[in-house]
Image (spheres, grey):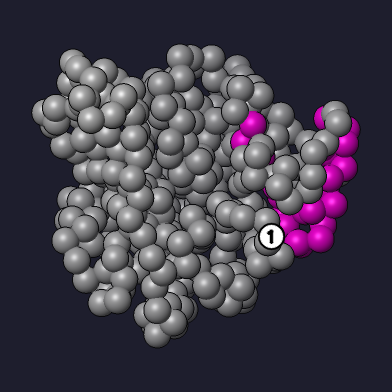
Amino acid sequence: MGSVVAERDGVIEIPDTSRARVLVVGDVMLDRYWFGDVSRISPEAPVPVVKIERVEERPGGAANVALNVAALGAGATLLSVVGADEAGQTLERLLDAAGIDVSLQRDSELSTTIKLRVIGRQQQLLRIDFENWPTHEVLRAKLLEFAQLIGEVDIVVLSDYGKGGLAHIREMIALAREARKPVLVDPKGDDYERYAGATVITPNRAELREVVGKWVDEHDLARRAEDLRRRLGLSALLVTRSEEGMSLFLDGEVVNESAQTREVYDVSGAGDTVIATLAAMLASGMPLAAAMRVANRAAGIVVGKLGTAVAHLDELRAQP
């Protein structure tokens, strides 16, 4: 792994990430953007008519996590399931072009998840989702490949979007622990018991509230977070809190980081950037609290961009 981070005059120096290796596993999707001009209302219904002028396609979900890891100069390996369709081929092509080591299991009964967004006048007007669940046989094959890959990486990221790609997440966490590899989980839903034994989980504020209930103040939040951390056997719980920044809950300690002050353009994919940055920094030898600060900085960069986006290493280093 790379050199450990240094901090001078309160400024964190980004470490060398070139030797870090991150395995990303989870639900991938293809984000499609249709950009157009809105100049009239439809005579058929009170809705805008969008004349499409440009189409963009970007990796989404766990694929966006891998893309963020690669943008930070670390080696990214992505393990997931796609359909035997055009969207799956497009995803693989985009990821290959980004220098990501891709292993996409093909499921002939699966349609690759697509999130189609229609953008007019720089605003999202509509989102259409196409998705279904992968088969048991394909998921079992992915678990076997995970066991083979785990020895080649420094850290594992499990990106759960609730699309069925992490049906064997308990076994994956157990395999990673046996290999002594840290496991970071971006959770989904209210069943956090399936993440027991992970190193760090990174829910946002709303996701955590679903699991621990509504807190009345910071002391109550810390108590609930610590109870969850202990129950799941986590080393830490990192909560992203939007305009309130981030909070890292460790054993008997809370580290808070204020949000980066900037204009928020689009928060989609910011969670992917946070966990990818955390993984790349930890795999490069950075302590957890410092890695959180860099992840917060990266999140501040991507929310100023449209759609699922990445924070590049040079952008991070340019930040104060």
Q: Is residue 139 magenta?
A: no
Taking the image as shown, residue 130 lies to the left or right of residue 197, namely left
Q: Quadrant of residue 256?
A: top right
What's the magenta region? 218-241
Between residues 205 and 103, which one lies in front from this camera angle? 205
Residue 127 on image: x %, y %: 35, 40
Q: Residue at x 29, y 20 (%)?
A: 122
Taking the image as shown, residue 246 lies to the left or right of residue 28, namely right
Residue type marked 1: Tyr
Relative vertical location of residue 108 with respect to residue 85 in this rendering, above or below: below
Q: Residue at x 82, y 57 (%)?
A: 230
Residue 206 on image: x %, y %: 65, 39
Between residues 201 and 161, which one lies in front from this camera angle? 161
Between residues 133 and 225, which one lies in front from this camera angle? 133
Taking the image as shown, residue 14 lies to the left or right of residue 39, namely right
- Local crowd size for mark 1, using a 10 Å CA cut-off: few (<14), some (14–19), many (≥20): some
